[in-house]
Image (spheres, helix red, strand yellow):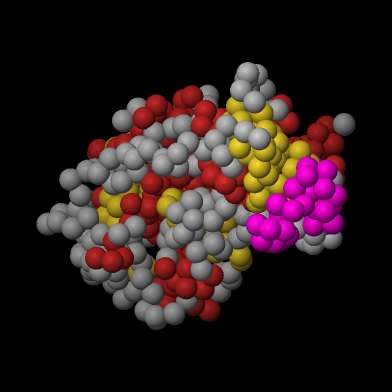
Amino acid sequence: MTMVQWWRHPASVAMQMEPTAEPVRQVHAVHVEGLDALAERLGASGWLSQSGFRPVAGALALVPGEGGVAAAILCLGAAAAPRGAPGALYGLLPGGLPQGVWEVVWEAPESRDEAGLACGFCLGAYHFDAYVPPRRPPARLLATEAMAGGIARAQAAWIARDLINRPANHLGPAELAQSAVSLGRVLGAEAEIISGEALAQAYPAIAAVGAGSDRPPAVAILRWAPPEGGDELPLVSLVGKGVCFDTGGYDLKPSAAMLRMKKDMGGAAIMLGVAALLIAQGAPCRIELRLGCVENSVSGHAMRPSDVLATRRGLSVEIGNTDAEGRLVLCDLLAEASDLSPDWLIDAATLTGAARVALGPDLPALFGNDDTLAEALLAAGHECGDPVWRLPLWPGYDDWLSSRVADINNASSKPMAGAITAALYLNRFVAESVSWAHLDTYAWSDSTRPGHPEGGDCQGLFALAGGILRLVNARVRTLMAERE
């Protein structure tokens, strides 16, 4: 599979990038306070009242004209109301507007947000069309230079969504690794794939997880640095769980629980999107990305409950549950990454159902050993409308992972706090001196909402990229001040 087969640019679908002879209609974005004056100016007062239009945030009305729909009105809610996610309401427009080219006119200048508009619009225009085309092409948005940042954010989300939505028979470990390497090379990163005997030696836990599948595991590694900048720039290390399908192994999942397991590589897809977005933004840092690409299957070669595995860190692991394989994939990668002493180490994974029980599908669980790092990610998520929620690395539960025959068990002895004990397991493999955060995310939307069509999603992507950018910019400013 080549990169062209899976990677798409949202501008090619949702944006009108070049001047066009096609008529450009207007969407009037207005607060409730300005709605009556706007409706009178457009001659639509009677139409709005007779059609039952309710002036609430996200309400969209099409204004008729002689040739059909002449314009549209998007209600932003009350001007004094707290702002939601920047651009979220604009996700309604691609499917809610008739086909053609549109531009947004903000009736209140302080509401103008072209980057948020572009991002929200492109996220709402997303459709996974590798096998079934959309019922109708989305409306297109007239592009401006000020939209570049928003388009870049949407592009990162599309990268992640396209990978998560691809079925496992078309995206195995080799294809996922090759997709990452192909995109990395386009982005100007050094890229390599480790497999076979080299992988078994360097990442024994990953090899053990993948042993049950006919499709062997692979590790994809990307390294990037700005064209100008050397080793003095901070190093950000990213790690993603790329389990292309998870049967649960011998601790087999119920059939209903397997229906969405193609998304178990969502952490890898999200981290690939984070790296792509940071590179597009020209982040002043060095980036290393490690993706563990593997399939957890059942066969005579698969790991068994009570097996004892080796790990890169040198710790032995008793297998208490073969369905707790994600932490085995991550632990080798975290050990390698942390031994290189990055300034920040962050991993993302669809790791536990316990995190979803605690926080639901929309709130990824955030863990970390550094308050400064955690607070930066939390603040960025709040600001960009991609919230994450911090849970504790509670040391009181650490002995729940004890084993009589190995250094650690991969499954807790208690049926509680599953997300916390999974994070505590990972913490054993991170050097104490390294600032580390772990994101337990869902990577899926169960239903369609503005900007979030049902299917693969990337909860946490914008929060991670935004928080990292805050941290590296602050670090670089400090370095520059020290030189003066």
Is the residue 433 above or below the residue 406 in the image? above
Q: Residue at x 66, y 61 (%)?
A: 52
Viewer-closest of 390 and 401 = 390
Query: Looking at the image, which is closer to me, 193 or 121?
Result: 121
Q: Residue at x 45, y 71 (%)?
A: 354
| Quadrant position of the N terminus in the picture | top left
The percent coordinates of residue 449 (x first, y second) are 54, 56
Q: Is 45 part of what is drawn in magenta?
A: yes
Quadrant containing the C terminus is: top right
Above or below, 5 relative to 325: above
As drawn, 248 above or below 461: below
Residue at 48% x, 36% y: name it: 137
Vertically, is 147 above or below 391? Answer: above
Q: Horizontal placement of 313 versus 197: left or right?
A: right
How many marks overall?
A: 0
Closer to us: 99 or 170: 99
Question: Percent from the top left, x then y, of residue 143?
Answer: 66, 29
Q: Position of residue 193 (x, y in %)?
A: 36, 33
Q: Residue at x 67, y 22 (%)?
A: 228
Residue farthest left in this picture: 300
Main SS of the magenta part reads helix
Residue 4 forms part of the magenta stretch: no
Relative horizontal placement of residue 334, taking residue 374 as reference (left or right): left
Residue 39: tell me if it is visible: yes
Residue 386 position, x and y percent, is 62, 54
Nearest the eye: 232 or 248: 248
Chain part drawn in magenta: 31-56
Q: Residue furthest right?
A: 484
